[in-house]
Image (cartoon, coloured by chain):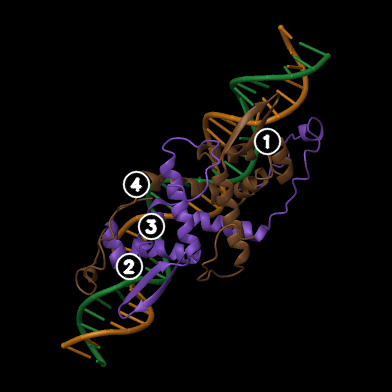
Chain colours: A purple, B brown, C green, D orange
DNA sequence: TCATCACTTCACTACTTGTTCAAGTGTTCA
DNA sequence: TGAACACTTGAACAAGTAGTGAAGTGATGA
């Protein structure tokens, strides 16, 4: 993925709507990076399913793999990605390693998105609906 | 991306912790797909920045491109992705096409994630903090 | 201490995605 | 009517990412 071609022909901004507002970079660049990373980790159906599963409680890799009909290695890799973005945490329990959602915020994100997705079968609207609405 | 290698050696599930709970697929597969699509669209720094910018109000493509020091085409493509996941909507205003966040839910998602990311410089915690914080 | 179990990591391939230039579309204004 | 503006779309390529088998790691139990 390359970058750069900047401003190939941006002229309107200085004329028509000269200054609507500063529209500055007041967003923390670092936070942006982490937020994007988090979203990227959640942006994959198998991984999201894994999280939805873990939202029901702790589970070991074998259990998760069996539940999804996938290989251990595959599931382990998915968990690695999720773990690198701090969406899940793990602890050893004898021979097993149990995974769980890292915190309530992750659960909120997943549930909100799923709720939102369920509400809107085919299109988003000018909704001013509040969260938590089922 | 291939698929399949299923159950290369999952035996523990049937022995040690035989049945912790059903842990069934009660998650709507279709909602999962849409939610993942939404997250995937948000999982890119430039696109997320675009949304953060739009959270401040409507803006035309040229304006957004100028603000980020990027080319029109580049920004237009990013907006296309965002639009395909219904995170932004647009309307024509004379020569310009003004983009805006599609709904409040998207703004919530972005702000929550950014807030969460800002709160946790280097690691996630057992936070039970509620949304809307800061 | 050695075999087994439950994973994790590595290396590799196939596939997906983002950026970019060139060309195309739709509006406005002279 | 046509030139200029503000985008959008298409195609191509580079770079990133997921899945997989094989090999490695760390507990447990005989």
Secondary element type, mark 2: helix
Depth check, mark 2 against mark 3: the one in front is 3
Identify the chain of the residue marked 2, using the numbered disc in the image: A
**Can residue A116 be spotted in the picture?**
yes
Total numbered labels placed on residues in the image: 4
Q: Where residue D8 sits: x, y (%)?
A: 59, 30
Depth check, mark 4 against mark 1: the one in front is 4
Is circle 2 on the same chain as circle 4? no
In the displayed structure image, the side of residue C22 where residue A56 appears, left or right? left
Q: Quadrant of the C terminus of chain B?
A: bottom right
Q: Nearer the viewer, residue A62 or A120?
A: A120
Secondary element type, mark 3: helix
| Residue holding disc 3 | A52
Q: CA distance from mark 2 to mark 3?
A: 14 Å
Q: CA distance from mark 3 to mark 1?
A: 37 Å
Q: Are marks 4 and 3 in contact (CB under 8 Å)?
A: no
| Residue holding disc 1 | B61
| Residue holding disc 2 | A61
**Can residue B44 be spotted in the picture?**
no
Is circle 1 on the same chain as circle 2? no
Above/below status of A91 relative to A70: below
Mark closer to the chain start, 4 or 1:
4
Q: CA distance from mark 2 to mark 4?
A: 21 Å
Q: CA distance from mark 1 to mark 2?
A: 46 Å
Secondary element type, mark 1: helix
Identify the chain of the residue marked 1, using the numbered disc in the image: B
Identify the chain of the residue marked 3, using the numbered disc in the image: A
| Residue holding disc 4 | B29
């Amino acid at each position: 993925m390359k970058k750069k071609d900047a401003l190939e022909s941006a002229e309107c901004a200085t004329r028509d709507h000269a200054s609507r507002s500063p529209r500055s970079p007041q967003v923390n660049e670092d936070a942006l990076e982490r937020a994007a990373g988090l979203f990227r980790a959640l942006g994959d159906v198998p991984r999201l399913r894994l999280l939805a599963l873990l939202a029901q409680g702790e589970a070991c890799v074998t259990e998760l793999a069996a539940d999804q009909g996938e290989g251990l290695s595959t599931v382990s890799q998915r968990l690695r990605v999720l773990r690198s973005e701090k969406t899940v945490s793990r602890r050893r329990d004898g021979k097993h390693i149990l995974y769980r959602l890292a915190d309530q915020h992750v659960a909120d994100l997943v549930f909100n998105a799923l709720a939102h997705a369920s509400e809107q079968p085919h299109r988003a609207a000018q909704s001013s609906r509040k969260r938590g609405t089922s």
